[in-house]
Image (cartoon, grey):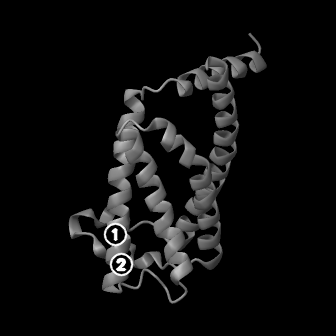
Amino acid sequence: MNKTEAIKSWFSRLVEEEVEDDIPYDERVASIAIVVFGVLIGLCFVAHQTWSTGFFTATFGTLEMLLLYGSLIYWIVTSALMLFDRKNLSRDFDIPGLIFATVGIAWLFVVFPFEFAYFADVLPDFLRFLVQWISNDIARVLMVLGFIVHLIFAVFSAILRVFVRKARARED
């Protein structure tokens, strides 16, 4: 089997899996992890904002807040939908949510309203080592990677949804 056939075979299996309504165990576990992590990081950001730790700079305005918290809420909601057996509804939110998150990351990268020297300040002392190594430069690299990953997944999800809808139309 050549590479093109292998990719077609892999993609065909993926479309078939998406047409089915059941949610695999690994996707449920990933959804739980995303919800927990999203809520924790959201609480961390809220703590920074309410305690004025210095993590958010003066350029962190309403638009930046909307983009940051909106992206987190998107991930939490779509993952929670998976936990409540709403796979198709979750998938329908994927494309606009990924585009929103991509635009949000790009804007936050340009404005960069953060000072990561203060990022660990809201954590208990015994947990600070987990994040105190993150500098502004490392955060910028992670944001570029996040932008690229979100963009790729947005395009991939759009293509996948087209094929899934076609497959469902054939079944009806």
Quarter assignment of residue 30: top left
Residue found farthest to the bottom: 58
Above or below 111: residue 89: above
In the rendered image, the quadrant that contains the N terminus is: top right
Locate residue 120: give its quadrant: bottom left
Q: Are marks 2 and 1 in contact (CB under 8 Å)?
A: yes
Q: Is residue 74 above or below residue 27?
A: below
Please give the residue where the numbered disc 2 appears in the rendered image.
Answer: 48
Residue 81 percent across, percent down from the top left: 41, 44
Please give the name of the residue rendered at 51% of the width and 73% of the height, measured from the top-left corner: 66
Residue 75 left/right relative to 166: left
> x and y percent of residue 118 in the render?
39, 78
Quadrant location, the C terminus: top right
Check the image and name the residue furthest to the top. Answer: 1
- List x then y, in percent, for residue 21: 46, 27
Q: Nearer the viewer, residue 38 or 119?
A: 38
The kind of residue tagged 1 is: Cys
Q: Residue at image x 41%, y 40%?
A: 82
Cα separation between marks 2 and 1: 6 Å
Q: Secondary structure at mark 1?
A: helix
Name the foreground residue: 161 vs 118.
161
Q: Which mark is residue 44?
A: 1
| Residue at 70% across, 37% down | 159
Residue at point 42% right, 80% down? 55
Q: Amino acid at mark 2?
A: His
